[in-house]
Amino acid sequence: MSKKKKTKMEFRYYKMPDGSPILALLGDKWVQTYGNDIDYLHFHNYLEIGYCYEGHGELVLGEQSLRFKEDQFTVIPKNYPHTTNSTPGTTSYWEYLFIDEDSFLRECYRGGSIGRVERMLERINSRATLKNISESPVLGGMIRQILDIMREPKAFYIDEAKGILLAFLVNVVRENQVEDSEQEKNEVLEGKITIPISRALDYITLHYMEPLKVSELASWCHMSETHFRRTFSAYMKMSPLEYINLVRIQTACEYLKKTDVPVSDIAYKCGFTTMSTFNRNFKQIMGTAPYEWRKRPENFEQQLLKCQIHSEAGW
């Protein structure tokens, strides 16, 4: 009996600019036909905020399918499966902000209550939303402000953007808190499994270089190992070990592209105990050996990110 083909889900990994919790995707590149020839969902390693200036089509958030149009915005937690599809034959114009809200809030509340930050992060990541700017003008207005600041960087522009970002996140916390009871009643949120699995994803991000056991991840998520494996695989469309290796190889690509560290040292830094295991996993994910890949780093965006990151001058 042939094995059932796995449902594809893409992990689009972004790297934050040095000294900033905000990555902005701006400009004409983002006027396009979204979802062209793509029939699978993807997720990111950061909170995604999107603003639609023009166009219309379908926005898929987990199991929900919604219609989007101009002057709407999205707030999508990290690790939350989604995709955007323009109406066939049309183009849409979106711009995006990716936010490292975890590090940013911990920096803002450094020396304060850890529990306060955890509660805020839980609220922010409790749901994915699509809203009209007329429905939520405060949040929509702040998104436009940050986008404009990042578009034309001036002196201290990151500090200005951070100030508005903090106000934005606080307002997201408030809105999600108000809607919690209604959400639980109507079960509007389809990605209810996001929070427990996100604990494992966050743990892997912080500890990928260490020996990791699935039993430890299950315990961290307060699940039995069997239930954890089943839940993780159902949500991520890959096993826990496959995801761990994916994160390790992505990190290895960063080292290969940006440093001259020996490949054997990179393998060790990324959590592989033997070169044979590193080479096997690297070739399985990237399609070539690490030594060969390093000679052609221009393939990094094509093979790993599956899209180009556009940044304005000034970063």
Image: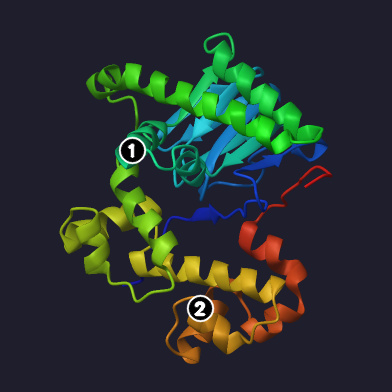
In the image, residue 264 above or below residue 62 = below
- Across and down, in percent, residue 131 comes to 52, 19
The disc, 2 or 1, on the residue closer to the chain's N-terminal end is 1
> 271 left or right of 308?
left
Relative to 176, say whether 303 is above or below. below
- How far apart are labels 2 and 1 at the CA level? 32 Å
Is 292 left, or right, of 115 in this rendering?
right
Residue 209 in the image: state x and y as whole percent: 44, 73
Residue 78 pos. (x, y %): 47, 44
Which one is nearer the viewer's eye here, 267 or 184?
Answer: 267
234 versus 266 height, above or below: above
Kind of residue sitting beneath label 2: Lys
Between 51 and 186, the one lying in front of the other is 51
Q: Which residue corresponds to mark 2?
A: 269
User: Which quadrant would residue 294 be assigned to in this image?
Assistant: bottom right
Residue receiving disc 1: 113
Task: Determine whether the residue tagged by mark 1 lies in a helix, strand or loop.
Answer: loop
The amino acid pointed to by label 1 is Ser
